[in-house]
Amino acid sequence: MANSVVCDAGGVLVASGVLEGVVPPAAEILALDWSALTVGRFMAARHAGRADAIEVETGLALLNVDEWFPVRTFVVDTVTRAGLDAHDALDSWSALILAEFLDKPLFTASDEVASTRVEILRPW
């Protein structure tokens, strides 16, 4: 996993070119499986529920991820660390915990996460 970066949903969207931003040079994109759902929700909003467009663009965005990890191993740590007010940022918090577990940088568009253990990369 040399030159790997962990992405939350925002990171996946930027890495795939759906959202604008500077993508860090990485040989490998890693993500939690539930980030796929957040990407799908973004596409559903973007395409006003048109299933054909949602399916195609979600699939294209998700193809950029080289390895998926199950979120179930980080559920308790995520809700404990993120707190009760982090509803929209849970994807980012769980991705941060994965990044710290793997000792890899996190690529995120979220301003809500911070770490003293790994580098946080943002698209701006």
Image (tube, rainbow, N blue to C red):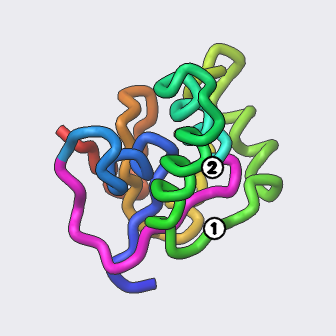
Residue 93 in view here: no
Q: Are marks 2 and 1 in contact (CB under 8 Å)?
A: yes
Q: Dominant secondary structure of the magenta stretch?
A: loop
Cα distance in 3D space between marks 2 and 1: 9 Å
In the image, residue 7 sits, relative to residue 37, either above or below, namely: below
User: Residue 68 — which label?
Assistant: 1
Q: In the rendering, at what x and y percent does residue 108 appear?
A: 38, 44
The answer to whether 109 appears left or right of 83 in the picture is: left
Magenta residues (range): 22-34
Q: Residues within 10 Å of mark 1 (few under 14, many from 20)?
A: some
Instruction: Name the amino acid type tagged 1.
Output: Trp
> Does 30 sit left or right of 26 as displayed?
right
Q: Quadrant of the image for the C terminus? A: top left
Q: In this orientation, which residue lies closer to the viewer: 21 or 69?
A: 21
Q: Is residue 10 left or right of residue 120?
A: right
Q: Nearer the viewer, mark 2 or mark 1?
A: 2
